[in-house]
Amino acid sequence: PVVNAFNDVLGLIGLALLVMQAFAFVDAALRPASAYVAAEKWAKQAWMIVLGLACAVSLVIGVMNIIGLIGLVASIVYIVDVRPAVRAIGGRRQY
């Protein structure tokens, strides 16, 4: 019973991390490319590739391994550093 509960908790954590990565990917897709250049960050296409690969890897092999953790770090960097800089430049979402 304890092992099952632990696995359930790990599954929920993995799902939450996947949702965070998907949020980063969608947010990056909705921001204008010019805002990335103005904020002096990587190009939008580079972030789309990195975040897309992070989501794909997490879906296929999970977050709880070294490759998944690298993608997780990339998503955190986007959310903590790139997203606020792009938003400050006026990178409003494109609908």
Image (cartoon, rainbow, N blue to C red):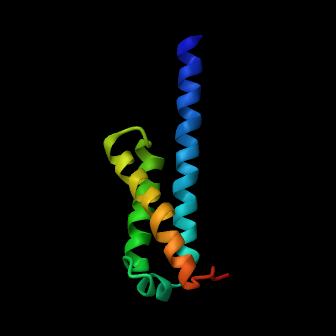
Quadrant for the N terminus in the image: top right
Towards the viewer: 13 or 82: 82
The correct choice, above or below, for 10 with respect to 83 in the image is above
In this view, 64 is above or below 70:
above
Give the total of numbered labels: 0
Position of residue 45 relative to residue 4, above or below, is below
Q: Quadrant of residue 62?
A: top left
- The outermost residue toward the right is 95
Residue 89, image x, y percentages: 53, 84
Query: Which residue is at 48% across, 48% downward?
Result: 59
Relative to residue 35, is residue 16 drawn left or right? right
Write the residue at 67% across / 81% down. Answer: 95
67 to the left or right of 38: left
Q: Which of the pair 53/85 is nearer the observer?
A: 85
Q: Residue at x 57, y 69 (%)?
A: 27
Residue sitting farthest toward the left: 66
**Could you say where residue 46 lies in the image, as x and y percent from the top left?**
37, 74
Q: Position of residue 26 (x, y in %)?
A: 57, 67
Residue 28 image position (x, y, % from top left): 52, 72
Q: Image quarter for residue 51?
A: bottom left
